[in-house]
Image (spheres, rainbow, N blue to C red):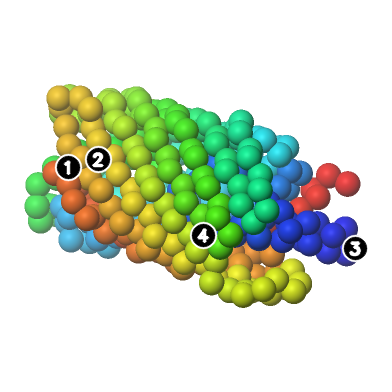
């Protein structure tokens, strides 16, 4: 118990809860989780599917490991009813982030990190409709992602600036989409895309830290964009995603976010979604 209290106090004073406004809901910051720590996430995304009018859901269990102060790893699974009538496993991915720059000042810091993600997905590229039914609209989606839609790799750079209670972060990445386990990418889909984001987080509560048991309240707004770069499937979009986050006892967090398209010309299967996530962190996993 003494070790836990010392760890939580250190986190509040340094890289963890004191920078809680960096724990973005839809993107990753350049900062890492504390070294020698383990995180468990359960994420649910809900959306309305344009082609059928049905409600869709994607479930993403995730395990995170703070290898050291510079390196962290994620292992993520995916299951949804987006491409079939019932919930089924779709595949998984591995994410690694390496923080290579840290500039620290009192109540402020600047971080930069590089990341890479690889996914192996077993899904069709067009939805499998139940026998005897037809889509209400033609399926004309040209958006691919590595979160259950397609296999592939993604890599890029993250820069995050903390200024007292405000944290700003930007991401720029490249996506290379590859064939799924049993299905090849259709010719009218883009195999290459650029992703970009701008995120802001603000610490609302507590006004002043007194102990690690205080509940944190953070507010976020994130701009999330992507551009397909091939002639086939060319298009872009820019989404906005406001979010609210609660952190309990410096170890457990609850995220709620709504995402909607601001602008774009890319044909997509869904233009808005709701996210709910529960995460729990365990510190000092190695004695």
Instruction: Find numbered disc 4 in the image and state the secondary structure of the residue it sits on.
Output: strand
- According to the picture, the residue beneath numbered tag 2 turns out to be 143
The residue positioned 36% from the left and 30% from the top of the image is 175
Cα distance between the residues tagged 2 and 4:
32 Å
Mark-to-mark CA distance, 3 and 4: 31 Å
Mark 1: few/some/many CA within 10 Å (<14, 14-19, 20+): some
Q: Given contact means CB atoms under 8 Å apart, are the residues at marks 3 and 4 in contact?
A: no
**What residue is shown with label 1?**
266
Instruction: Say whether residue 265 is visible.
Output: yes
Q: Nearer the viewer, mark 2 or mark 4?
A: 4
Closer to us: 187 or 241: 241
Q: Earlier in the sequence, mark 2 or mark 3?
A: 3
Around disc 3, counting alpha carbons within 10 Å, would you say few (fewer than 14), some (14 to 19), or many (20 or more)? Answer: few
- In contact (CB < 8 Å): disc 4 and disc 1: no
Q: Which residue is mark 3?
A: 2
Lower position in the chain sequence, tag 2 or tag 1: 2
2 or 1: mark nearer the eye = 1
Q: Are marks 2 and 1 in contact (CB under 8 Å)?
A: yes
Q: Is residue 233 left or right of residue 276?
A: left
Mark 3–mark 1 distance (CA, rounded to whole Å): 54 Å
Q: Residue furthest front?
A: 106
Label 2, label 1: how far apart the Cα atoms are: 7 Å
Q: Nearer the viewer, residue 164 or 194?
A: 164
Provide residue 9's location: percent of width, then percent of height.
79, 62
**Could you tell me if residue 131 is visible in this image?**
no
- Residue 63 in the image: above or below residue 95: below
Q: Secondary structure at mark 3?
A: helix
The residue wearing badge 4 is 166
Residue 28: where, in percent of width, then height? 50, 46
109 to 112, vertically: above or below? below
**Badge 3 or badge 4: first in the primary sequence:** 3
Earlier in the chain: of badge 3 and badge 1, it is 3
């Amino acid at each position: 118990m003494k070790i836990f209290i010392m760890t939580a106090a250190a986190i509040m004073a340094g890289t963890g809860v004191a920078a809680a406004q960096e724990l973005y809901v839809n993107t990753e910051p350049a900062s890492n989780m504390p070294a020698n720590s383990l995180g468990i996430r359960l994420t649910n995304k809900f959306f309305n599917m344009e082609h059928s009018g049905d409600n869709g859901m994607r479930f993403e269990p995730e395990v995170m490991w703070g290898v050291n102060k510079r390196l962290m790893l994620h292992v993520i699974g995916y299951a949804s009813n987006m491409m079939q009538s019932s919930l089924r496993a779709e595949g998984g991915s591995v994410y690694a982030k390496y923080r290579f720059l840290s500039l620290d000042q009192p109540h402020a810091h600047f971080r930069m990190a590089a990341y890479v993600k690889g996914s192996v997905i077993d899904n069709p590229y067009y939805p499998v409709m139940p026998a005897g039914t037809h889509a209400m609209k033609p399926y004309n989606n040209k958006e691919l992602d590595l979160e259950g839609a397609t296999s592939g790799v993604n890599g890029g750079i993250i820069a995050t600036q903390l200024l007292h209670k405000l944290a700003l972060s930007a991401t720029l990445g490249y996506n290379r989409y590859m064939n799924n386990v049993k299905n090849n990418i259709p010719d009218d889909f883009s195999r290459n895309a650029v992703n970009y984001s701008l995120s802001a987080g603000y610490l609302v509560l507590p006004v002043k830290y007194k102990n690690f048991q205080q509940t944190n309240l953070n507010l976020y707004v994130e701009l999330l964009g992507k551009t397909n770069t091939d002639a086939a499937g060319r298009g872009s979009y820019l989404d906005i995603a406001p979010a609210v986050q609660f952190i309990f006892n410096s170890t457990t967090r609850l995220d709620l976010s709504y995402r909607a398209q601001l602008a774009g010309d890319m044909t997509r299967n869904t233009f808005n979604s709701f996210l709910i996530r529960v995460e729990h962190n365990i510190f000092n996993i190695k004695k």
